[in-house]
Image (cartoon, grey):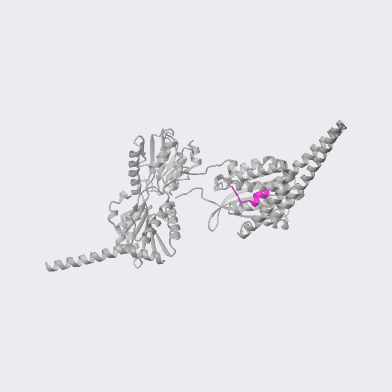
């Protein structure tokens, strides 16, 4: 009995020691954070590297770590459980990590997605002791009834917003009777089915909620093509693992569904968005990773958190695709007020409000206030010179200085002529007035004076139009780009549209444009910039490239190019014209450089092209030419993402 009591006392002391050690762990870390101690962090990712959702989540983790911590090391393990998910595999991972991290210790373990958390719940203590675990990407906390009992585990659940998404769909179409859910039949998928069923029954008992069960994605594709667009919608959750075991990229099933569906396809996650789906209130991998690290930072700073788990959909966002809304005849005005709508087109005035307003103002000034235009130009020149100094100090638009002198010279000439013509018109008017007042005017003299006034007015209008065009051209070079409109552009059809808009000009020169492209070359880009670039190149060829020739050919070719770091769109433009000598080729992009100034050339066309390529599109342009051998431009433009993906 005495020995038994001794054992009880020893065990109690040991347990109390562990408890005290555990309770002070967070406080110790708090001191480390404040002192800038180096942190060792392990990110256990449930899926494979390159998986869209995982990549977005990892980016959220790393961006937030960089923002919150100045001294840390991050190691990442990819468990690859989308491709293999068995208990035997988890045992192998346990043995691998036991050997790999036998001599390593971590201050914090980050867990991404359900399979990683399940693994840590089973093996954390054996592998890493009581190291704190912070998780995200977990479909529902209800799948982990014993999570509360596990010490030093904290995290963020990814509660979907199917209720809000269905609500947004009902605002578009109040006659919806059937909602079809597309989700894989994995453990995570089953949890999603259960949660969404509960939400639908509680919030929309009048709607039939259906799930595509025991069907491949291709069978589901056939099924959605036969749904009634008046009363049904489809909601895509995730479908990386098919019922036959095949593993897909997350955006592939959503693309198949959008292409085949006769009804709108809504999304629950960002990886289903931008492939033809309408949208919805979406869970974002990036936000999940970001919130997990913020939660971890709060814990490390304070030594504790009041609530161990965050389980709401407050970080989800409404996002919709304008093109998909239009496809199904859905109204943008009926969307929730805080919705983000991508691919929404703007009117020409909205896109070019500054240019239209300034142009209209300048036109009025040229016609109505001709006598004061010289002082206005002088005033604008002083403003440009002042802006030049500020921009040079900020190392922006260093070439503005050359433009100031050029525009002052170019504009003053037609304005001076205009004032002279106006004075002449005033002289003739006074002379006619005196003759009429005295009654000594003949019909012939009156007609001659009228004709002279008409001819002088025509010259005046031509001169002012030239001045107005010079000012507009100068603005395009000197003023920052005001239009940020980006959209998906099919380069083949878009180039045909541009060429068709210039068909009359090409007929005059007997020039044929051959467009060489793949119909599938589609990119998300600044459409207005592409239009302006090709417009200027073609007009430059028509004006200079085929001078002295009776006909000509222009080739425009588009293709994709894999650079060392990114994928590029390449536009190769070639005219088979007279070419350029080396001294002209060297100055081709300089503002106001032209070989046709006597024929009305302003020298701004190629300068505008260069700025659009290098500044607006962040690309590069290369020109090669030789006399009588034609001219070739090669333009490489980085391809941007048109939507957030997972």
- At x 33% / y 39%, what residue is drawn? 202
Report whether 586 appears left or right of 24: right
Q: Report the magenta stretch's main SS.
A: helix
Picture quarter with the N terminus: bottom left
Q: Which residues are magenta?
A: 473-482
Furthest residue toward front = 438
Q: Position of residue 498 (x, y in %)?
A: 63, 43
From this viewpoint, is residue 146 visible?
A: yes
The image quarter in which residue 193 lies: top left
Q: Is residue 548 magenta?
A: no
Residue 579 shows in this picture: no
Residue 37 % position (x, y): 40, 67
Query: x, y (%) of residue 82?
Result: 38, 52
- Whether 629 is drawn above or below 221: the answer is below
Q: Give the residue at the far left of this rendering.
A: 1
Left or right of residue 348: residue 93? left
Q: Nearer the viewer, residue 188 or 461?
A: 461
- Is 480 a magenta residue? yes
Q: Please tell me how many numbered marks the rendered image carries.
A: 0
Horizontal relation, residue 528 to residue 7: left or right: right
Q: Position of residue 259 (x, y in %)?
A: 47, 40
Residue in the picture at 50% in, 38% down: 326
């Amino acid at each position: 009995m005495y020995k038994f009591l001794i054992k009880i006392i020893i065990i109690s002391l040991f347990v109390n020691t562990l408890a005290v050690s555990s309770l002070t762990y967070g406080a110790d870390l708090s001191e480390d954070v404040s002192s800038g101690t180096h942190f060792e962090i392990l990110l256990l990712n449930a899926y494979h590297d390159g998986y869209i959702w995982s990549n977005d989540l990892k980016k959220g983790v790393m961006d937030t770590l960089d923002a919150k911590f100045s001294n840390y090391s991050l190691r990442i393990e990819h468990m690859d459980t989308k491709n293999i998910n068995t208990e035997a595999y988890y045992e192998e991972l346990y043995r691998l990590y036991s050997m790999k991290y036998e001599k390593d210790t971590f201050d914090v373990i980050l867990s991404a997605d359900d399979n990683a958390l399940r693994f840590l719940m089973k093996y954390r203590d054996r592998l890493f002791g009581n190291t704190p675990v912070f998780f995200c990407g977990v479909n529902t906390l209800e799948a982990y009834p014993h999570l509360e009992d596990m010490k030093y585990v904290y995290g963020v659940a990814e509660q979907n917003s199917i209720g809000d998404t269905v609500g947004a769909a009902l605002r578009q179409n109040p006659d919806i009777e059937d909602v079809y859910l597309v989700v894989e039949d994995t453990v995570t998928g089953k949890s999603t089915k259960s949660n969404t069923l509960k939400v639908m029954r509680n919030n929309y008992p009048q709607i039939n909620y259906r799930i595509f069960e025991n069907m491949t994605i291709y069978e589901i594709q056939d099924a959605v093509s036969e749904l009634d667009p008046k009363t049904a919608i489809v909601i895509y959750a995730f479908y990386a693992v098919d019922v036959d075991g095949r593993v897909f990229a997350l955006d592939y099933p959503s693309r198949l569904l959008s292409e085949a569906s006769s009804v709108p396809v809504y999304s629950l996650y960002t990886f289903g968005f931008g492939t033809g789906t309408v949208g919805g209130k979406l869970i974002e991998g990036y936000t999940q990773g970001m919130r997990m690290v913020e939660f971890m930072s709060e814990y490390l700073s304070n030594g504790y958190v009041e609530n161990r788990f965050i389980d709401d959909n407050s970080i989800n966002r409404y996002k919709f695709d304008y093109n998909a809304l239009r496809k199904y005849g859905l109204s943008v005005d009926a969307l929730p007020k805080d919705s983000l709508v991508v691919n929404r087109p703007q009117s020409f005035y909205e896109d070019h409000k500054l240019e239209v307003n300034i142009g209209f103002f300048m036109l009025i000034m040229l016609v109505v206030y001709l006598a004061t235009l010289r002082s206005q130009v002088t005033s604008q020149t002083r403003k440009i010179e002042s802006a030049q100094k500020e921009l040079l100090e900020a190392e922006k638009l260093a070439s503005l200085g050359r433009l100031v002198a050029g525009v002052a010279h170019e504009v003053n000439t037609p304005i001076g002529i205009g004032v002279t013509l106006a004075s002449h018109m005033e002289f003739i008017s006074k002379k006619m007035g005196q003759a009429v007042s005295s009654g000594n005017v003949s019909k012939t003299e009156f007609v001659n004076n009228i004709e002279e006034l008409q001819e002088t007015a025509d010259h005046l209008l031509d001169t002012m139009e030239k001045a107005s065009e010079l000012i507009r051209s100068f603005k395009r070079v000197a003023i920052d780009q005001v239009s940020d409109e980006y959209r998906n552009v099919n380069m083949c059809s878009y180039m045909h549209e541009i060429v068709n808009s210039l068909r009359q000009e090409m007929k005059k020169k007997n020039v044929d444009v051959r467009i060489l492209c793949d119909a599938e070359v589609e990119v998300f880009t600044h459409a207005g910039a592409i239009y302006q670039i090709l417009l200027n190149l073609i007009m430059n060829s028509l004006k200079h490239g085929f001078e002295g020739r009776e006909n000509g050919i222009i080739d425009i070719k588009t293709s994709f190019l894999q650079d060392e770091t990114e994928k590029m769109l390449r536009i190769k433009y070639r005219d088979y014209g007279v070419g350029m000598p080396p001294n002209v080729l060297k100055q081709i992009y300089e503002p106001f450089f032209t070989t046709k100034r006597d024929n009305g050339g302003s020298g701004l066309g190629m300068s505008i092209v260069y700025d659009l390529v290098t500044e607006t599109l962040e690309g590069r342009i290369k020109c090669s030419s030789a006399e009588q051998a034609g001219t070739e431009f090669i333009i490489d433009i980085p391809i941007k993402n048109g939507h957030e993906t997972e």
